[in-house]
Every structure is written in C-alpha cells, then in structure tokens.
C-alpha cells in the first residue's frame, strides 16, 4: 500500500505495530512533516505472541473458546513479565 500513497506524493512512514517506541517515533515524524499529507502504515502480525494464533488468518475475527483464551492469556502474561524484567 505504501507505493500507492507515495504515487500521490504522500509522506509515508512505515512502522512495526508491535513496537510502541517505533509508533511514537512515527507520530513525531508525522507531526514534523509539512507540505504533504502523512500516512503511517503499521505492519502487524495477527495473533502476535500467542503460539496457536500467530500469523494464522483464521483467528482474524474468530473468538477463542475458554481453554484457548486461558492459554493465550498465560502466554501474553509471560511475554509481559519478560518485557518488564
């Protein structure tokens, strides 16, 4: 999609949707840019950090059952604990 916006002379900023520092930096860059509209394209991975969901389109718009939910939450909590040190 980036080339389409660039073809219309938009300022295109691409970032990782899973990296809050990158997202913050993208907004700062967008705010500083003058003379053309800006679009931020945030690339993401469906189901990021959940073993049975990651990068599987079938989980886009599908709710997990109770057991799947508990597994997903335990994996996400483990990721958070790792990030927090």
Image: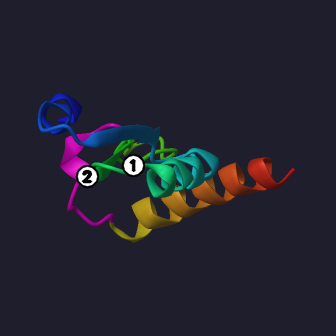
Give percent across and percent down for residue 46.
34, 46
Image mark for residue 83: none
Q: Which residues are magenta?
A: 55-64
Q: Do tag 1 and tag 2 residues touch (Cβ < 8 Å)?
A: yes
Judge left or right: residue 71 versus residue 66.
right
Image mark for residue 59: 2
Identity of the residue drawn at 33% across and 64% down: 64
Q: Find numbered disc 1 in the image and state the secondary structure of the residue it sits on.
A: loop
In magenta segment, residue 75: no
Give percent across and percent down for residue 43.
36, 40
Give percent across and percent down for residue 72.
50, 57
| Colour scheme of the picture | rainbow
**How far separated are the C-alphas under marks 1 and 2?**
7 Å
Q: Quadrant of residue 2?
A: top left
Mark 1 lies on residue = 47
Q: Main secondary structure of the magenta part?
A: loop
**Relative vertical location of residue 72 with respect to residue 69 in this rendering, above or below:** above
Sequence-wise first label, 1 or 2: 1
Q: Which one is in front, 73 or 10? A: 10
How many other residues sit within 10 Å of disc 2, few (<14), some (14-19) or many (≥20)? some
How many other residues sit within 10 Å of disc 1, few (<14), some (14-19) or many (≥20)? some
Judge left or right: residue 20 versus residue 69.
right
């Amino acid at each position: 999609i980036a080339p389409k916006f660039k073809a219309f002379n938009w300022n295109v900023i691409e970032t990782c949707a899973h990296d809050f520092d990158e997202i913050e930096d993208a907004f700062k860059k967008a705010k500083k840019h003058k003379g053309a509209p800006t679009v931020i394209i945030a690339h993401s991975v469906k189901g990021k950090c959940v073993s049975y969901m990651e990068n599987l389109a079938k989980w886009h718009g599908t709710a997990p059952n109770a057991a799947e939910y508990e597994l997903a939450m335990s994996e996400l909590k483990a990721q958070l604990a790792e990030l927090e040190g």
